[in-house]
Image (tube, rainbow, N blue to C red):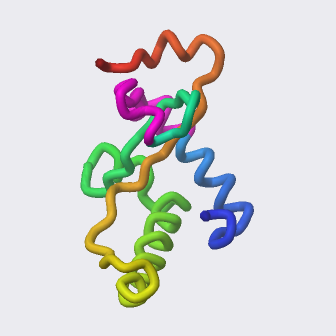
Amino acid sequence: CCRCLLAPSDLEGMAGTADRLAKAGAFSRLPRAIEQGYLGRGAAAKTLALDLESSDIAALVQDSALCLAEEALSSLGEVLRPLAREALGFELGTRTSTLLALPLQGAEEDDYESPE
């Protein structure tokens, strides 16, 4: 989705911000019971619910392309909200936080154990 809305330089900036968040220890592993539902069959990743209200997270993503992407997704939802009832048969109420997912690399599997 973001590739349609953002410039390549913004995508690179998002990746850099995600790397900084990972180095700051902001990512964790989803519980196994829900990991497949969020990430897909057989997928494993370190994840972060992007909560811009959290001062720790907000400080690391402030003025980054991640904020731009978050705003773009919210705007898209606002545009689609009035059309959803007729086209999809239900109303769009609220949206959850954006979930960032980075693939686990090699030995990271041990560093990011899945909570039970």
Point 68% across, 70% down: residue: 4
Apparent side of residue 40 relative to residue 31 in the rendered image (left or right): right
Expressed as whole percent of the image width and height from the top left, the position of residue 73 reads 47, 70
Point 49% across, 10% down: residue: 110
Point 39% across, 24% down: residue: 32
Instruction: State whether residue 48 is above or below residue 71.
Output: above
Q: Where does the N terminus fall, quadrant-wise?
A: bottom right
Q: Where does the C terminus fall, quadrant-wise?
A: top left
Apparent side of residue 93 relative to residue 83 in the rendered image (left or right): left
The reply to whether the magenta stretch includes residue 57 is no
Q: Count every numbered label the image shows and give the total.
A: 0
Instruction: State whether residue 94 is above or below residue 25.
Output: below
Q: Nearer the viewer, residue 76 or 61?
A: 76
Q: Which residues are magenta?
A: 19-37
- Of all residues, the one furthest to the front in this rendering is 89
Instruction: State whether residue 15 is above or below residue 70.
Output: above
Expressed as whole percent of the image width and height from the top left, the position of residue 80 reads 44, 83
Point 52% across, 30% down: residue: 45
Apparent side of residue 82 relative to residue 38 in the rendered image (left or right): left
Q: Nearer the viewer, residue 109 or 56?
A: 109
Expressed as whole percent of the image width and height from the top left, the position of residue 2 reads 61, 64
- Which image quadrant for residue 27? top left
